[in-house]
């Protein structure tokens, strides 16, 4: 086979020509290693691998040394069947596929006189341990979390769902990154229409590289410019397994510890994995607190400004006197004062996140205490404004997943309150609710089970029922098997 024929992607039977093709393809990169050696029968061979992504011991002992010792035959079929013990091995004649295998961490074995090569699974690289995610800490329940390795994350899900119905579909996304993306679902529960919709979207993605699962989420969202996320995220295998059991699908992206889930409901952000390991009374109380936290984080600063500017009669008399005494001499208007305090808190928050861990903690304490006290003493802001902002900031983190959206809403409501007072706040609430009611995620209403009202799914909403009472899967989104628990009647299951 000549060079013109090799450009079509087919291997040549000439070893030197194949090596030359690989060297040209990889632009002479120093981390692409070519290990030339001879088989026991004297035939020339070459092992090609990517240094740093392969198991060097396996290459040396189980490939090179094994062939030098036992390689009496030089055809790739005999080598594969009689000599090599690799769990993952494939005969391949397409040069593009062989090059792609090298970039994935596999080893390519080329033998002189053979127009086929062997693609051997020798992947090995350092990965982060299986630790508890910092954003999903629990007192009760599993503590293991995903890491950046695709196969490790797949295994963690397999350990939770040891069923033949668990399906993994593989895709590669990204022109240069060739990132592995795994679609996961339970075949006898999930709605196949949703699987096809997501599959079609994945196959249509054309981008240079995928560096994290958040890249994929942007392509899966129905409204890409919305401040509300429309794709669920999870960092723990028990959460993903629970969603799969409800009929959702999961997307695992190589290099990301965050797994995506679809369809997504706004209610999911009110739920915590620990809710399902606690008694229903404690879980319900915690969800009510989170719900109140959402309202307080967005509305309390706006209502304070609107009451102070336009509707002072809304505030109790004693509190009014306290406020009037506190704001005496403050050069800023109530709206500008609150905007200034919000800005300071946002700057402190951003700085504490970006700075080294222990310095960030010290910065938060110094900023909150020293800067706040100094601002009050200097007469720039009032004590009630700081207290209102502190309540809003703390409430914001009762639902961390909604932090970004709620921060933007808080500013929007402050602007409406400063311009239109309480009426502006009410208009903002109406517009926000109307917008949420218009959203959907793959045929599933975003605000379900509240709108439209799904009585069956209210068992796991703000008020949570016991696990034994939730006998059916959620009806807010489509699935093919509604029964998940056989209820007991008179002591007998039916």
Image (spheres, rainbow, N blue to C red):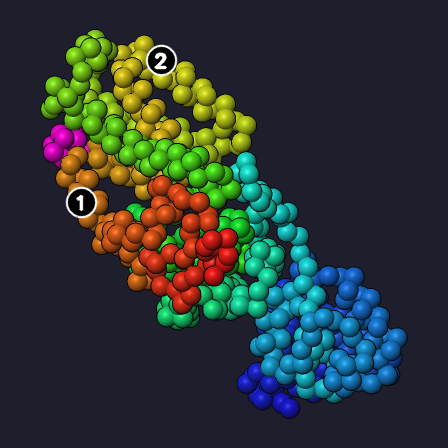
**Residue at the farthest front position:** 490
Label 2 SS: helix
Asked which quadrant contains residue 222, the reply is bottom left
Q: Is residue 423 left or right of residue 449?
A: left
Percent x, y of residue 347? 37, 30
Dominant SS of magenta comes to: helix
Q: Secondary structure at mark 1?
A: helix
Q: Is residue 326 above or below residue 224?
A: above
- Mark number displayed over residue 374: 2
Q: Residue at x 47, y 69 (%)?
A: 188
Answer whether labels 1 and 2 touch (C-beta < 8 Å).
Answer: no
Q: Is residue 212 visible?
A: no
Q: Within 10 Å of the Cα at label 1, are there few (<14), some (14-19), or many (20+) other Cα atoms?
A: few
Q: Nearer the viewer, residue 400 or 454?
A: 454
Q: Is residue 347 left or right of residue 22?
A: left
Please tell me whether residue 418 belongs to the stretch shown in magenta: yes
């Amino acid at each position: 086979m000549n060079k013109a024929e090799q450009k079509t992607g087919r291997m040549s039977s000439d070893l030197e020509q194949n090596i030359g093709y690989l060297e040209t393809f990889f632009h002479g990169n120093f981390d692409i290693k070519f290990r030339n050696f001879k088989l026991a029968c004297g035939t020339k061979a070459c092992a090609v691998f990517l240094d740093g992504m392969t198991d060097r011991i396996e290459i040396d002992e189980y490939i090179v040394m094994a062939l030098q010792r036992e390689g009496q035959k030089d055809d790739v079929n005999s080598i594969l069947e009689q000599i090599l013990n690799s769990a993952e091995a494939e005969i391949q004649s397409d040069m593009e596929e062989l090059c792609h295998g090298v970039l994935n961490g596999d080893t390519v074995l080329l033998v002189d006189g053979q127009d086929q090569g062997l693609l051997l699974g020798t992947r090995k690289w350092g990965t982060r341990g299986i630790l508890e995610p910092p954003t999903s800490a629990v007192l009760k329940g599993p503590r293991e979390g995903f890491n950046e390795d695709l196969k490790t994350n797949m295994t963690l899900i397999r350990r939770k769902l040891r069923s033949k119905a668990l399906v993994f579909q593989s895709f590669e996304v990204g022109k240069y990154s060739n990132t592995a993306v795994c679609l996961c679902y339970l075949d006898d529960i999930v709605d196949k229409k949703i699987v096809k919709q997501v599959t079609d979207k994945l196959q249509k993605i054309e981008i240079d590289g995928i560096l994290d699962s958040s890249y994929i989420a942007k392509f899966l969202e129905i409204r890409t410019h919305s401040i509300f996320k429309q794709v669920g995220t999870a960092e723990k295998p028990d959460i993903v397994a629970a969603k799969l059991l409800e009929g959702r699908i999961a997307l695992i992206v190589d290099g990301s510890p965050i797994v995506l889930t679809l369809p997504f409901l706004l209610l999911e952000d009110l739920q915590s994995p620990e809710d399902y390991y606690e008694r229903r009374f404690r879980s319900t109380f915690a969800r009510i607190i989170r719900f109140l936290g959402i309202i307080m984080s967005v509305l309390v600063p706006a209502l304070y400004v609107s009451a102070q500017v336009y509707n002072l009669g809304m505030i109790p008399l004693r509190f009014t006197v306290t406020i009037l005494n506190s704001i005496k001499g403050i050069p800023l208007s109530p709206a500008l004062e609150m905007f200034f305090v919000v800005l300071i808190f946002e700057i402190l928050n951003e700085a504490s996140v970006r700075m080294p861990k222990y310095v960030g903690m010290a910065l938060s304490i110094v900023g909150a205490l020293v800067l706040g006290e100094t601002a009050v003493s200097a007469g720039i802001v009032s004590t009630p404004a700081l207290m209102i902002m502190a309540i809003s900031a703390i409430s914001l983190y009762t639902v961390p997943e909604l932090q970004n959206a709620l921060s933007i809403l808080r500013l929007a409501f402050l602007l409406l309150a400063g311009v239109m007072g309480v009426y502006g706040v009410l208009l903002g609430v109406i517009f926000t609710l109307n917008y949420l009611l218009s959203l959907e995620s793959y045929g599933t209403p975003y605000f379900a089970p509240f709108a439209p009202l799904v009585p069956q799914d209210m068992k796991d909403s703000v008020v949570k029922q016991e696990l034994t009472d939730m006998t059916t899967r959620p009806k807010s989104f489509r699935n093919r098997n509604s029964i998940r628990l056989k209820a007991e009647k008179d002591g007998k299951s039916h």
